[in-house]
Amino acid sequence: MSITNIQSPADLKKLPKDEIPGLCEEIRNVLIETVGRTGGHLASNLGAVELTVAVHRVFDSPKDHIIFDVGHQSYVHKMLTGRADRFDTLRKPGGLSGFTNREESPHDAFGTGHSSTSLSAALGFAYADKLAGNEAFTVAIVGDGAYTGGMIHEALNNVKSDLPLIIILNENGMSISKNRGAFARYLTRVRVSSSYMGFKKGTKTFLHKIPLIGRPLEKAARWTRDRLVNRFYPMNYFENLGLYYIGVIDGNNEEAVENALQRAKEIGKCTVIHLRTKKGLGYAPAEAHPDLFHGVSAESSCGENFHAVFAEELCKIAEKNPKTVAVTAAMGQGTGLSSFGLKYPDRMFDVGIAEEHALTFSAGLSAAGMEPYAVIYSTFLQRAYDNVLHDVALQRLPMRLIIDRAGLAVCDGATHHGIFDVAFLSEIPGVKIYAPISFGSLRTMMNHPYPKDGTVEAIRYPNAGENDEVVATFYPKGEYQAYGVSADFPKDNSMDAVLITYGNETARVLKAEKMLKQKGLSVGTVVLEQITPYKDVADRIAPFASGAKQVFFIEEGIRNGGAAVNLESSLTGKFGGNLPFGYHIRAIEEIPKPTEVCDLYEYLGFSAEKIAEFVSEILGNR
């Protein structure tokens, strides 16, 4: 049977066992071909083919709840649950999500775009079923990288052994970069327990065969058996928590995984099944370099990227300053810090998928006199809000917070949009937010003296390179400023419209400006490379905006609490309560979730054409 003929897990269950290897091979071919076109998480899904097939052959989704951690290893699950015919829309706005998504299918029990959340959610399902009297299993498929995150261990602390919960530990030695930390090292040492399992099972089978007294003997001997087992096979972390443990099993052997899952169902208690899989299996380049094929881009990127420039400049700074250190949370490759780590291994700290720890650890480094650069994706920084507030800002500890992937995440979608950091960071006293529009601006900011007065400098940039037109417009002489605002027109000019923006949206705003000028309108653009403090930025904007008939703030960020709304308030105060111009905001009103394939910027009204249309309608000039 072809993957296109499998409309539900029920179809998969009908397949004879001898057809399963062929199906797995076909699935791998579809993954390689499709993800090569759409982009996405390739290596992790290639390694999870057999385990996903086995899960759906043993359990009954959606009655049984299957939760992936992280959800980027759910591509095979999507194919097996009626979405194979839409797989070519993967990671396109309005198409299939690159993660599990409750709105997409009833088979996606829980959305998991961020790591280490699965077990907490799985416990919720398991307890809910128990309270409602439902006979259902909950299966959490957890990548070993997720075990470097604290939430998993917080959840394990609340697991009860009598729950119908199956925890599959999918160990492949990688999250994105190589796994870090004590627990990752522990997993590589866990006993290969086929003989251990045989000892336990063999003891029980032998006692069962003794007539009349077998079962009483089994009960009486359990105490002795457990101590014998522990004498020769010391208990591991999971068994010490009271959980039943099966492992280590070849996770790329579908039959072996299926047998283990059936055994777990029969046991009738919370069970950990420890699998070892090969990330990238079936595609030689991904097998050889799983870190490089963790995320595959649909388009080859040309030229430098902001995070590459950041890492290069940080190496130069560290060469002169022994106090310079870098901290990231399992994103050494993605943030460009891998190159820094190669040059300064003692000053590069990858703490695993533990953003909260990363920030408080950075706070400790700062308190001890070091000069840390905490480098985290915008969407993951949300998880460390309290740490920035309580452990850094409240104690007035100086720090540079480098925010990668700022702005819309077109392919990764709702779970990964970096559109909230300006809103939530600007609420915290002592945090100053910057958004360089050029590599030169970024370098200049980094070479400005490290903050010493308790200030947190948050420097945000997109997963992109600089735009040549933006650089030519605002820095024609190559004289880059560290902070401030820039405009492509003189101060105090009378204008039909002034457009204000920052970050990655600047290029589209400039294009919209050209379109509006072609209609005979006098239009100029102001770009912010410093976003907060808002009062200071308002003082710098006022000379450019005061002569305008209308001012338009275009913000690739959330509206509520965002820069546009706060600057309106600051400008209103500056002008005595009455703005001398109309003030109009185009910002993101809610988390974007298009239901049909589309251009996300067009959908949200952030394309150059939509911006020009928005301005024209306000000015009454279509």
Image (tube, rainbow, N blue to C red):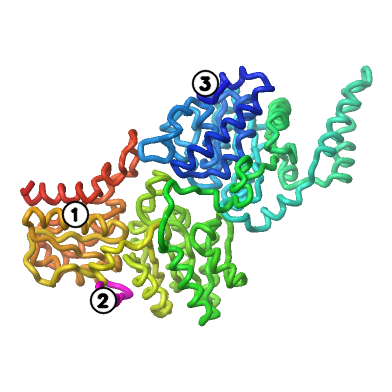
Check disc 3: other Cα within 10 Å, few if <14, some if 14-19, many if 20+.
Answer: few
Q: What residue type is labelled 3?
A: Asn
Range of magenta residues: 476-484
Q: Is mark 3 on a helix, strand or loop?
A: helix
Left or right? Give the position of 231 relative to 30. right
Quadrant for residue 270, please give it: top right
Q: How far apart are marks 1 and 3 (CA)?
A: 47 Å
Q: In this view, does 84 lie above or below 532?
A: above
Left or right? Give the position of 507 relative to 26. left
Quadrant for residue 527, please give it: bottom left
Task: Give the main secondary structure of the magenta stretch.
Answer: loop
- Work out whether residue 269 or residue 521 is closer to the camera in this orientation and state it: 521
Q: Nearer the viewer, mark 1 or mark 2?
A: 2
Q: Is mark 1 on a helix, strand or loop?
A: helix
Residue under numbered circle 2: 477
In the rendered image, is residue 268 in sight? no
Precedes in sequence: disc 2 or disc 3? 3
Q: How far apart are marks 2 and 3 (CA)?
A: 61 Å
Q: Is mark 2 on a helix, strand or loop?
A: loop
Mark 1–mark 2 CB contact (< 8 Å): no
Residue 186 is covered by the magenta coloring: no
Residue under numbered circle 1: 512
- Work out whether residue 284 or residue 110 is closer to the camera in this orientation and state it: 284
Residue drawn at the location 51% of the way across and 42% of the way down: 72
Residue under numbered circle 3: 5
Check disc 2: other Cα within 10 Å, few if <14, some if 14-19, many if 20+.
Answer: few
Q: In this view, does 128 lie above or below 196?
A: above
